[in-house]
Every structure is written in structure tokens, then in C-alpha cells.
Image (tube, rainbow, N blue to C red):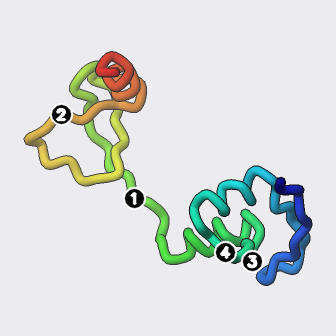
Amino acid sequence: MFEDKTLTCKECGNEFVFTAGEQEFYAEKGFENEPQRCKACRDARKNAGRGPREYFVGVCANCGGEAKVPFQPSGDRPIYCSNCFNTIKEQAE
């Protein structure tokens, strides 16, 4: 079986734990190499190419409140605030 391993991040030099569960996941996916970077460095590397996300403000079609969305509303489809969006999503499930 797998046991936790302590690895050293090649990016920042800090030690991190490669848990038994993570090792099992890697094995299931067929990954042969151990991770080279800690989670913080992997996340930073993943997000480095992205700029900050731009949000647009509109009026929620359900409650009339402020709706912030990550796309430019075109006006031909309703937009919802996060509370109404979550409520609608839960009702659909």
C-alpha cells in the first residue's frame, strides 16, 4: 500500500507531503512521476497565464437586485444574482 512521502518543491524549496491518497489517485490515473511542486506553487503556476477575471453588473431577472456575471450580458437572455442562480440551480436538481 501507499504511505505518505515528504517531497521538496522544485519551485520554492519547501517540503510538502505527497499523501497516500494522492499517490493512490496518481496510480489510478496512470501517472508515473511524483509531483515536483507543492500545491501553492502548482496553483500559482496554473493561474499565472490568467489575468484577473472581469465582472459585469446587471439586473437580476428574478429579484431585481444587482447581478455580477463574468460575461458581458447581451440582453437576450436573463441573468441572475448569485442567490437566485443557486436557488434555480437547486430546484433543477
Q: Quadrant of the C terminus?
A: top left
Q: Residue furthest left?
A: 76
- Whether residues under marks 2 and 1 lie with C-beta atoms below 8 angstroms apart, the answer is no
Q: Amino acid at mark 2?
A: Pro
Q: At x 86% / y 61%, what residue is drawn?
A: 17
> Mark 2 and mark 4: span between their CA atoms?
47 Å
Q: Amino acid at mark 4?
A: Glu
> Mark 3 and mark 1: span between their CA atoms?
32 Å
Q: Which residue is mark 4?
A: 32
> Mark 2 and mark 3: span between their CA atoms?
45 Å
- Please say if 48 is above or below 23: below
Q: Residue furthest front?
A: 1
Q: Secondary structure at mark 1?
A: loop
The x and y percentages for residue 22 are 73, 56
> Mark 3 and mark 4: span between their CA atoms?
12 Å
Q: Badge 3: few (under 14), some or many (20 or more) residues near its Cα, within 10 Å?
A: some
Mark closer to the chain start, 4 or 1: 4
Mark closer to the chain start, 2 or 4: 4
Q: Which residue is mark 1?
A: 54
